[in-house]
Amino acid sequence: MRTVRAFEVLSFVVPLALAACGSDKNREAKSSSNTAAYEPPAATAQPESAQHEPMTPASRMSDQEERNDSTANPPRESTSDTAKSSPLSDEQIAAAGAHPAPLPELLAACHAVSLHVALTPETDGLLGEKELALMPDGAVLVDTARAQLVDLDALRCELESGRLGGAALDVIPVEPPTPEHPAPDWPRLIVTPHVAWYSAEAEEACVSRPVLSVRAVLEGREPEGAVNRP
């Protein structure tokens, strides 16, 4: 049985949601545009060498090496993108009922730490030997973001010594693992293949939430769970 992915369903569901929620005028405009004659794009001439150049083993190897390199070293999010959202002030955090704390204080006070941050030059190596040593004995670390956030050699030492209670990694330096770069196999460690998010409910939410958000905007409402506002 073929598995239908979320993006495949979205390609059908979102247009249906747009059509269902649009005004009569929009539907009429869409109907008239659909009846217009289709004009195929003009063909772009290519050099004869480019049209008939065969794929050689060397070129295939080059493509494979490029894919492996991009997998082993995922791109960092642009700092300019992350800077668009200003960090919350201590007052805003406190008003929401949380206690603002710097990272060292947070690590020392938490018995379970879960990472959900983007990989940027500022977060690369966020938890190193010094930071992991601040965590209480028996504490648990979960990383579902990027492998480069954590010093894995330092984490291995903490796990093998028995000081940390455990760790769960949904991300590793090379995905998928290879014989040259196998998945970590340490005591008190769980490794999942970057699918820790998955459940039947989560798969359904990948389709339903975007559609409901589009509908909310078309109806003049704010989508549920919006974090970025104009």
Image (cartoon, grey):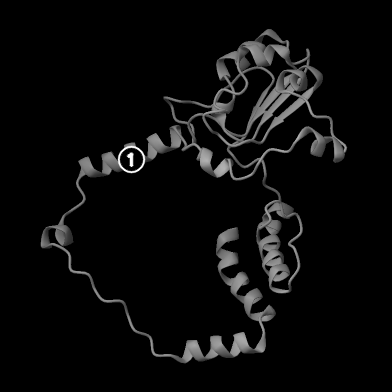
Residue 56 in percent (x, y) is at 19, 46
Q: Classify 10 as above or below 76.
A: below
Q: Which residue is mark 1?
A: 64
Query: Is residue 1 at least partly visible in the picture?
Result: no
| Residue reaching furthest to the left | 48
Kindly identify the residue that appears in the image at 63 percent across and 80 percent down: 19
Q: Classify 51 as above or below 219.
A: above
Kindly identify the residue that appears in the image at 62 percent across and 17 percent down: 155
Query: Is residue 154 at least partly visible in the picture?
Result: yes
Kindly identify the residue that appears in the image at 34 percent across and 39 percent down: 66
Q: Secondary structure at mark 1?
A: helix
Residue 42 horizontal side relative to residue 154, left or right? left
| Residue reaching furthest to the top | 161
Q: Quadrant of residue 189?
A: top right
Q: Quadrant of residue 140?
A: top right
Residue type, numbered disc 1: Gln
